[in-house]
Amino acid sequence: MKNTYTLLALLVCFILTSCNKKQAINIAGSTSVLPIISVAAEEFRKTNPELNIIVNEGGSGVGVNQLGEGKLDIGMVSRDITQDEIVSYPMVNFNSISIGKDAVVPVVSSEIYNSGITSLTLEEIAKIYSGEFRNWNELGGPDKEILVIDKEASRGTRHVFMEIVLGDKEAIAAGADLVLGSNNEEQTAIVQSDAAIGMLSNAWLNEDVKGLSIKMLDGTIIEPSLKNIIDNKFPITRDLLIVTNGKPTGAVKHFIDYLLSSEGQIIVEEAGYVRINQ
């Protein structure tokens, strides 16, 4: 009889523990998508306290790879899934869902911008990253050596930027002096320098990190404004994606539906991006 009571007590304890354990949604990846998902997760939990939404960064490559390895429910990605990634995970049905739109902007230290370099052609930017231009005075700026900041190869921001600027998303930037990861790291490095150039999501621009306009072949100057992103005029734009393995179901679908709702899209706008229905 004592053993029976013990077994019953253990069973009740197991049931209570299972009932009290929150369901988790694991999300990781792009630091460009991160500001949206972090805020959305916090707001979503207010009306869904039974869910534990765990959000980490790491870059688009991390989002894709960990989703492929079954470690995530949602990968945050700011570029297209590559063919190599599809081949690497043949059992995964990568399902990409756009939750917003963004521009990848060539950015410079405020000192360079204030010296008069407020726009460059794509060719000029390419020559900076290939190492042909080494000093800002070659572009009409001050006599300062250019600090060229590149991103890690797996980063979505780099893929989009390099494909437009150098014609290959995996192009080698021979002129790069520094290779960094997250938007936050690059933003900090540009602020700390007085002669840097880099690439950032439009939402990460501020008074110390200035976005350059693009000078087109016909002489038109295209600013990295939200209006130009909405109108598809700025030449380096992209979708901000979340990726699941197949069609989402259950709590994951519920959260994604929230991101696509009017409430979720307000969060997209407040993060500095463009909502998908514009």
Image (cartoon, grey):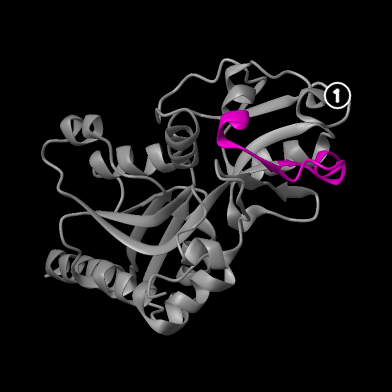
- The location of residue 128, given as percent across then percent down, is 64, 24
Above or below — where is 176 with respect to 276?
Answer: above
| Range shown magenta | 108-125
The residue at which mark 1 appears reads as 144
Residue 2 occupies which quadrant of the picture? bottom left
Residue 170 occupies which quadrant of the picture? top left
| Magenta residue check for 214 | no
In the image: residue 123, left or right of residue 72: right
- The location of residue 143, given as percent across then percent down, is 88, 23
| Magenta residue check for 114 | yes
- The location of residue 88, given as percent across then percent down, is 19, 30
In the image: residue 171, left or right of residue 207: left
Furthest residue toward front: 218
Q: Residue at x 85, y 34 (%)?
A: 194
Residue 113 occupies which quadrant of the picture? top right
Residue type at the position of mark 1: Lys
Q: Nearer the viewer, residue 117 or 150?
A: 117
Q: Nearer the viewer, residue 77 or 25?
A: 77
Quarter of the image containing the C terminus?
Answer: bottom left
Circle 1: element type = loop
Q: Residue at x 14, y 48 (%)?
A: 93
Q: Residue at x 24, y 66 (%)?
A: 14
In the image: residue 85, left or right of residue 126: left
Q: Residues within 10 Å of mark 1 (few under 14, many from 20)?
A: some
Visible in this render: residue 97?
A: yes
